Amino acid sequence: MIELFQKRHSGREYNGDRDLPDDVLMQMVEAARWAPSCYGEEPWRFLMVRQRVSPNLHADVLGTLAEPNRVWAANAPVLVIVMAKRQWTRNQEDNFWATYDTGAAAENMMLQGTALNVLVHPMGGFSPDAIRGLFGISDQYHIMAVMALGYEKDNPQLVERKRSPAESRFFWESWSEEG
């Protein structure tokens, strides 16, 4: 299983000639649906924009991205806007765990994509206000990320992935703020 986590990467070389079939997308949706959430709230919302279905809307979403992201994300056949509902459904109070739960659902989607050889690249470089305006999304939802989905080109140039040593991020029975 560790190999799946190590295989996941945020590449930028999408095969623009190859679409993602709906059955593959639905497997990724199902993986996200089964993420854990506090009190079973499922605060996540994923707005899927498929280039083959809505090419103009896909282009509009691309326009909300930071310029460096626009260049490579243009070849991704699916763009996904990841949002968290800020309040609990049951009492309308603030849901402190909404973004945590939504992150878990997004990670499930990414790992299922990796298992299906789908490249998923989450982006923070976008304009939440532009996305709100484009779709009429209220402030009730926190727009967290835009993810590009698609198949990777053959033989992409991979960047070496590095991670901090475990002892600099994981602590056992004592705490240190260094590292």
Image (cartoon, rainbow, N blue to C red):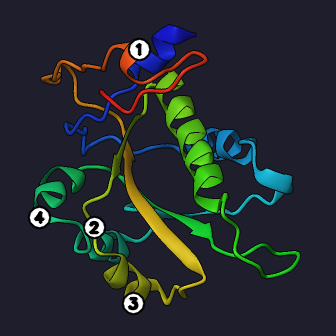
Residue at 39% x, 52% y is: 147
Disc 1 is placed on an element classified as: helix
Q: Residues within 10 Å of mark 3 (few under 14, many from 20)?
A: few
Vertical side of 94 occupied by 6: above or below? above
Q: Looking at the image, is 25 positioned above or below residue 154? A: below
Judging from the image, what secondary structure is the residue with disc 3 in?
helix
- The tag on residue 66 is none
List x then y, in percent, for residue 79.
39, 58
Q: Nearest to the eye among marks 2 and 1: give it.
A: 1
The earlier-in-sequence mark between 3 and 2 is 2
**Numbered tag placed on residue 126 in the rendering:** 2
Answer yes or no: is residue 22 visible: no
Within 10 angstroms of label 1, few (less than 14), some, or many (20 or more) residues?
A: few
Q: Amino acid at mark 3?
A: Gly
Q: CA distance from mark 2 to mark 1?
A: 31 Å
* Inter-mark Cα distance, 3 to 1: 42 Å
How much space separates mark 2 and mark 4, taking CA atoms? 9 Å
Name the N-terminal-most of marks 4 and 3.
4
Q: Secondary structure at mark 2?
A: loop
Relative height, residue 108 to residue 64 (above, below): above
Considering only vertical position in the picture, is 144 above or below 18? below
Residue at figure coordinates x 29%, y 75% from the top left: 127
Kindly state the secondary structure of the residue where label 4 is placed: helix
| Mark sitting earlier along the chain (1/4) | 4
| Residue that badge 1 annotates | 166
Residue under circle 4?
67
Looking at the rendered structure, which numbered label has been put on residue 133? 3
| Amino acid type of the residue that numbered disc 1 sits on in the rendered structure | Ala
